Structures are given as C-alpha cells and as structure tokens.
Image (tube, grey):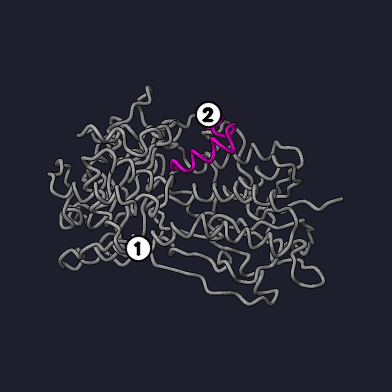
Amino acid sequence: MTAPAVVVGGSVTGLATALALAEHGHAVRVLERSAPPPDGPAAKAAELWHRPTVPQSDHSHILTSLGVRVLRRWAPRLLDTALEEGARLLDLMDAAPAADDPHGAAGPWAGADHELTALAVRRTFLELLLHRAVRALPGVTVEHGTAVRGLLLDGSRSRVTGVVTDSGAQVPARFVVDATGRKAAALSWLAEAGFPLGEDLTGPTQLRCFTRFYRLTASDGALPGPLNRGNAAGGIWDHYAAVAHPADNGTFAIAVGTPTADPATTGLREPAAFTAAARLSPYVTEWTDERVSAPLTDVRAITMPPNILRSTARPGRRQVAGLFPVGDAVCVTDPLYGRGMSLALQHAFRLVELLDAHPEVGESQSEHAVRLADEIHRPWYEQAVHDSFTRARLWRAQAEGGAPPPVPPAAPGRPALPEVARAAAADTTVWRGLVRVLMGLNTPAEVFDAAAFRDRVRAAAARPVPPGRVPPRREELLAAISPREVPH
C-alpha cells in the first residue's frame, strides 16, 4: 500500500494543501499539534476557537484579490460556502477615483476589473470552513494533538520517507509538507538529521500591532463608512497606521500599527486608549461609534516577526527529496500589507499541481518545487523589506522630531510608492495598477517598471492632488492615549 502524503500543520496553509492533494487523488494524513475547532454554527465556532499555537490568528487578516483568484480557480466550493455562511466579497472599484481623462478607462487592466475584489472574512472563520471541508474528504485523516519532532530518511539519507512524532511513533509518507508556519519546523528537523542549513534572508519589520474585533449592531449589514482603501478603511501615515477591516457575519477588526521601539504607544493595549486612537484616525472614526458597533474582544497586542525568505526556498542549493515547505514556512512578509494568507494559498495549490506534473520523488522534483517557491515569494519578500525599511525610518524620524526622509524607489528607475500613490489619487489607470500590486495580482516589477505606467506617474506630478482627511499629529495621538489622572 502506498504511504500517504503527510502534511505537518493543520492551519490555513496545511489544510489548503491537504484539500488540493485530496482532490488530486492523494491519500493525506494531516498532523496538527493543537486541539480541533469547536462544533456548531461556523460564525460562533470561529469566535470561540482559541489558537494558542497560532498567535496571529487573533489579529486582523486580509484575503486579497490574489486570494480570491486562488479560491475561484482551485477551491470554488470553499468560496461558495464562505459566502453562504456570512463572508462577503468587496468590490474594490468602489474606491476608484473618478475617471479624469478619456484614456483612463481604456487602460491595460480595464478588462480585468472583475478581479479587483477581496473577501471580508476572519482568519479563524475561513480556517474553520477549510477544516470542515478537509475532514469530510475521503482519504484524508486529520490528527490533532500530534507534534512532529523529526524526519525518517531512506538508506542514502537523500530522501524523506516519513516523520517521527513527539510520542516516538514513526509515520511513513510518500512525501512530507512542512506547513508549520513561521516556526518553519523543517529547519530544525534537517539540522537534527545533520544536514547543513543555508542562511535565511531577513529584514526587520520594526512593527507591533494592536487589534480589537467588533460586531456591527445594524441588521442590514451596512458599513459605517467608506472603504477608502478598497478592502479597508483607514491609512498608513507618517507615524502610525490604523485600519478597519470588514469581516464575516457583521464583524470587523480595527488594527493600529506602531513602531516596536516606541514605549509612548504601549498604552494602546488599554481599551480606552485604543478607542481614542481609532476615533482620531481618518476613515476609522465612524466604525467606533457606539451606535453602530460593539466590541467583541479585548485589545490584543503582537510584535511582528521580521520579513524572512528561508534558505529552503533558494534555487541551486542541495535539497532533501520529498520535503516541501509551503506558505509561511518558506516566506514571511510584513503583515501590515496583508499578503501572507493569499500567498500561502497560492503556494499550496500550485505546489500540488507541480507535484502532479513531476510525480517522481527526487532531485528534479525538489528543484522544481524550490523554483516555484522562489517565483511566488521572492518579489513580495523584496518589496516587503523595502517597504518595512522606509516605513520604519519615517516613523522613527517622526518620533525623534526629525525631518521626514525621502522615500527611495524599490528598484532603479522605478517610481517610489508615494509618487505612485499621489498619481493614483486622480488617475484611474495608475490606481488600477497600484491596487493590482497591493492586492497581489501583479508583482511590482510587472506594473511599476512598465514604461507607460511610469510615464503616467510622472505626468500626474504636475496635477493637484484631491484633498483628503488628515490624521492626527504624533503629539495629538500621544495626548489622546496617555493615561489620565482620576480626580479623588
């Protein structure tokens, strides 16, 4: 009997990989160290599902246009179920500027506006639906409370043949998928087996986030205010960020981002300070009105990990056959830009297609898988490192009272992101291109390096920018969130 594919990690990436494998005819065994989700209606079960092994699950997540594209292509039933159970598709074109010239509507992406959507959904809600879909598939077993501590190798020690669990059980596998997320457990498995590891590429995010979930009190599902960012309301400004993300079943999250090395903003952990900051933030203000929403959770704080591109996703390095890291086990990018979940889903489904096209476990299959991982993740890792650096430098200058530093382009000859954003405020073609990059549909190079796109950005420099809402100055924000003395 052929050994099953073993997927280590039963979160979003692991479950999506298991779903894809099963639908391609593979027997699958998912090993997950945490407890299973609760039963009951999906919306309530997602609210009750506590994930201590996935701390980021308690925070706001985005399923970008790339994620919606992936579900439409590879998991349409899952998308349909999510919509039936209370998720909602957001039309990003609602945030597009009015066309100001006869050529804007005929831009290079005009015929693809249907792709500019996002899915309003909590991560735990989507993960719960994935879990139920996978659990119902024939040929799939999902085992909770099982951690993996190492690999089984063949006699030549060049191919993985299974895993060893924390109880010492040996689980044979046709191949092993590492879906352990940021932990990237395959690195420790390989090190324990005596394999030399390459160096990961890293770049700091210098970011911490404070998140609180709410529920809309209106029964008609109407949003409190405009989604000026297409799938969110708010902004990333010169000393902090604040956004409201709609989710499923009338829920939404407000997230406030600040520098890690900024003790003055630590008070945002307190509900009163968090609410004060949210109410000062343009486009977020309306969402905090007590007449339209009520808090579901306390304020949750998390320090974000650095951007990472793992050595196991570097072409040209010797790989161990039959071991495939996927999603965050390969690459982590700055969560402020919300790319992670969508990139992970794309990686999961494309990896399974690759394994079908190259079914023989061996060096060639592994090299194809590494090149795929590099193709999917490297452009976004490089962009995230640049964006994290420029944001952190700007925020640090504001905190120290210095002049705002110029924002360099991410690549020679490419317009800097503030230039693109300025042009996008009045040019629908530039706006489409920018949003397609922000939503993961095209890489920065595919859009920003196009000569016609650069010309439009330069042409917009001489045109006035429509006025927008102004965020609070740092002094105003700190005054609002500072503890107040209670009179005796």
Q: Nearer the viewer, residue 84 or 286?
A: 84
Q: Residue at x 32, y 54 (%)?
A: 257
Q: Residues within 10 Å of mark 1 (few under 14, many from 20)?
A: many
In reply to whether residue 67 is colored magenta, the answer given is: yes
Q: CA distance from mark 1 to mark 2?
A: 38 Å
Disc 1 marks a residue whose amino acid type is: His
Q: Does residue 344 lie above or below 191 as drawn?
A: above
* 445 left or right, relative to 278: right
Q: Residue furthest right?
A: 1
Q: Residues within 10 Å of mark 2 (few under 14, many from 20)?
A: some
| Predominant SS along the magenta part | helix
Name the N-terminal-most of marks 1 and 2: 2
Q: Position of residue 333 (x, y in %)?
A: 44, 58
Q: Residue at x 78, y 58 (%)?
A: 171
Read off the magenta span: 64-83
Disc 2 marks a residue whose amino acid type is: Glu
Identify the residue under disc 2.
85
Identify the residue under disc 1.
386
Q: Position of residue 452 (x, y in %)?
A: 29, 47
Dot 2: what SS? Answer: loop
Q: Nearer the viewer, residue 34 or 426?
A: 426
Dot 1: what SS? Answer: helix
* Residue 431 - label: none
Q: Position of residue 208 (x, y in %)?
A: 36, 59
Residue 306: name its quadrant.
Answer: bottom left
In reply to whether residue 412 is colored magenta, the answer given is: no
Residue 385: name its quadrant.
Answer: bottom left
Q: Does residue 286 lie above or below 481 as drawn?
A: above
Q: Residue furthest top?
A: 220
Q: Residue at x 57, y 74 (%)?
A: 198
Tell me if I can see residue 488 in this picture: no
